[in-house]
Image: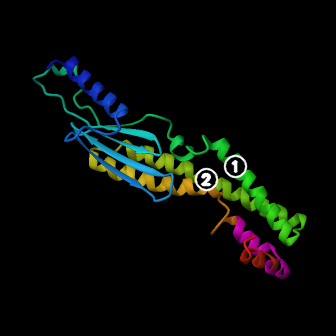
Amino acid sequence: MTTTSGWRRWILLIAVATLTVTPLRGQGRVEQNAGAGTTHDLTLVRTEGGAAFAIINGCRITFVPGAKPDAAEAPLEDVPSIRKARVLFLRDFEDLIYFSVRDEAEARARFVMILEEKLNMADRICELSDSQREKLRLAGRGDMIRFLRTAEDIKARYESAAALIRDVDEFDKWAKALSHEVAVQWAVLGTGPFDGNSLFVKTLKRALNPEQVGKYARAATAGG
């Protein structure tokens, strides 16, 4: 085998892993994880030759194994001494997190809309003062910033970890962990980062007076 034909074989392998979703019988392993009733899903595929790819919410990530060329194939000066394993992103990493809303700007706009709806609802129930409304708005903006920073942290951590992946088993673990964190972010994209332990909820509890707290609790019990 010549050096040129060897490199062509690996280029073809990358192309097949990029274009094929389900391998032929006996030529690979497919593993799917999908939450019941959710739009989030993960598909893991292993192909012959130690390559693999993961599909997370339609975003494909390919793992190409490293290789040490055979000295008999070509003179050492004609080939790299070692070809490192690589993780290739078919699309931008942000698509994994913002796929349902396209990008960070649209996510931010969606959160602003949800926050205003929550403020208006609280105002209808509790007749908020200007000061209370402003405190809640600032808290909601803090929740938005926290979400966006978490998204940036996920990107930085997993891109860094991808550069250290050496084999397909490590790639599987990396993809599953990434898929889990992306699923959490997707859930927040759907409802907004203003529930549970959010700054908005904590500020709401502190900012309302006892009468307003009672009104809000009764409205929540009655379904808003």
Disc number for residue 189 = 2
- Is the N terminus in the top left, top right, bottom left or bottom right quadrant? top left
Q: Position of residue 43 (x, y in %)?
A: 37, 47
Left or right of 61: which side holds 209? right
Q: Residues within 10 Å of mark 1 (few under 14, many from 20)?
A: some
Q: Quadrant of residue 115?
A: bottom right
Q: Position of residue 35 (x, y in %)?
A: 45, 58
What is the three-letter code of the residue carrying label 2?
Leu
Q: Position of residue 195 (x, y in %)?
A: 65, 65
Check disc 1 and report the residue beneath it.
110
Q: Secondary structure at mark 1?
A: helix
Mark 1–mark 2 Cα distance, whole angstroms, equals: 8 Å
Seen from the viewer's position, the closer of residues 13 and 147 is 13
What is the three-letter code of the residue carrying label 1?
Arg
Q: Judge whether residue 174 is colored magenta.
A: no
Bounds of the magenta segment:
200-214
Seen from the viewer's position, the closer of residues 125 and 167 is 125
Check if mark 1's residue and mark 2's residue have beta carbons within 8 Å.
yes
Left or right of 46: which side holds 117? right
Disc number for residue 206 = none
**Residue at screen point 23% across, 32% down:** 82
Asked whether residue 132 is in view, the answer is no
Prevailing secondary structure of the magenta residues: helix
Left or right of 110: which side holds 45? left
